[in-house]
Amino acid sequence: MPARVKGPTDHVLIVGAGLAGLSTALRLAGAGRKVTILEREAVPGGRNGLLQKEGYSFDTGPTVLTMPSLIDDAFNCVGEKLEDWLELKAVSPLYRAFYADGSQLDVHANTDEMEAEIARNVNAQDAAGYRRYVDFVTKLYKYEMNDFIDRNIDSPLNLLTPNLARLAALGGFRKLAPKVNQYLKDPRLQKVYSFQAMYAGVSPQQALAIYAVIAYMDSVNGVFFPKGGMHAVPRALAAAAQKHGVDIRYNTNVAKIEYNNGRARAAITDQGERIECDVLVLNPDLPVAWRDLLGKTPLSVKRLKYSPSCVTMLIGSNKSYSHLAHHNIHFGESWNGVFDELINQKVLMSDPSVLVTVPSLDDPELAPPGKSSYYVLFPTPNLDADIDWRTQAGPYRDKMIKTLEERGYTYFGDSIEVESMTTPLDWQAQGMERGAPFASAHTFFQTGPFRPRNLARGFENVVFTGSGTQPGVGVPMVLISGRLAAERIVGPVK
């Protein structure tokens, strides 16, 4: 049995109403615990935030929603159903990929549809290879999910299951890029089925093939979009939690944790209020929670290496483009070079690959009538790089606009009515270590049992949740981390 917190668990205090904190809260409420959430912002969501400006509603964090069954699972813990709280639309195509040679490719979840797309736009050999690739990632997901992702891991010995041997036989511990290339020969397909490694903070050349499971989660299982934008997800989870007795206190900033004899006793707010608890769950970025709230930084946390960061621009525009899908990936000519620049050289991309999401395409109410909203993401190095964003933000913003205009977004700069830019420095100010919204990188020794545990060493009643702990980064992973945190407190949650 996985280790659990010690002592009473009647009142659980959760710091942070991010997706992981809300996932934890619903499970604990369903298990009969008194739950209080302290959230510094006026709305729930954490990184999955909301910006409203001049009639536009922007998601400030993740834009790609996969594995909605995990959201439904959280609702089920209090006897609720997802469809009563959220209206989800399947995004089609999942992505539209644009390439430097002028070609484009639509990515579909339906295997027959995608096979036909590849046969039509690439070749028959790669269409057959795609079929085999889908079989590969489906098996990966089957072998990984229960034993390696959706469970608390206390020791590498916990991984010694029959599925470990199956993963090894499948080639899951080889490098991702060569494994993808084994099935898909066309470089365009190799890019669109391996770029997901960026979510894990590593290059496809560096990542293990087990990270192709991310490709399963979106490119096979599907991508969805909630009516009202991605922020509708934390709003719904928070509302369901409150319906079932969870006390969420917004605009409440926790300054420090009071503890003695290895046991957290209370949270102290920046207004001096003291809120007692039996168990403490920390949803802020793990290294920040250690340093700023617990007043310590273990050596294992000091040694963490972080994912690349990104610059995002939220744009309200009077211009639309008929060639775009909901999610659009624009690949430059460079591929290996992009990751080398971001991760090894720690410099800005010389030939950018970028993501442009158009949320108003599937929900026009997110923009004023006749207008469009855009979420533009350019990967960048994190704050370990020698880049002064106080002076570079303006020039880089202009470079982003110029790049988009060169990639087919004619007069994009001139059509902007509203804009908001977030740099690595801003991510850091929001509480993300090294300005890295994708948290510590999923290198081999920062993955699975080697990723920071969700039980705080030296404390008998402090649990972490969120992307900095197991199982890792991404909306599905942080929702799972909420279940794992709850299970550290009350045991298996149904």
Image: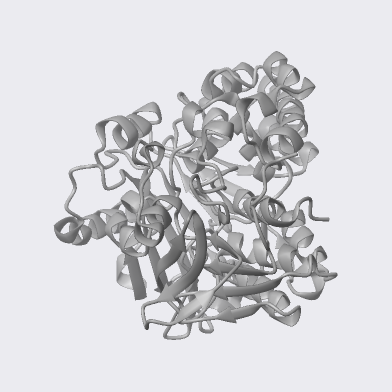
Which residue is painted at 77% across and 55% down in the image?
69
Task: State the residue at coordinates (76%, 24%).
Answer: 163
Query: Would you identify the image quadrant in which residue 346 lies?
Result: top left
**Left-right relation of 236 to 355:** right
Front residue (pair 478, 34): 34
Q: Position of residue 230 (x, y in %)?
A: 59, 66
- In the image, residue 152 above or below residue 419: above
How far from the left and from the top, in percent, is residue 17?
55, 69
Q: Quadrant of residue 108?
A: top right
Q: How many tags in the picture?
A: 0
* Residue 1 lies in quadrant: top right
Relative depth, front residue between 412 and 364? 364
Residue 383 rendering spot, x and y as whole percentages:
27, 48
Q: How is the image coloured?
A: one colour
334 relative to 69, above or below: above
Residue 204 seen from this side: no
Residue 396 visible somewhere in the drawing: yes
Q: Please state if 141 lies on the left or on the right of 301 as rendered.
A: right
Which residue occupies the extreme left position in the image? 391
The residue located at (64%, 43%) in the rendering is 107
Residue at x-position 46% and y-position 38%: 99
| Residue extending farthest front | 261
Q: Nearer the viewer, residue 133 or 289?
A: 289
Q: Position of residue 87 (x, y in %)?
A: 74, 71
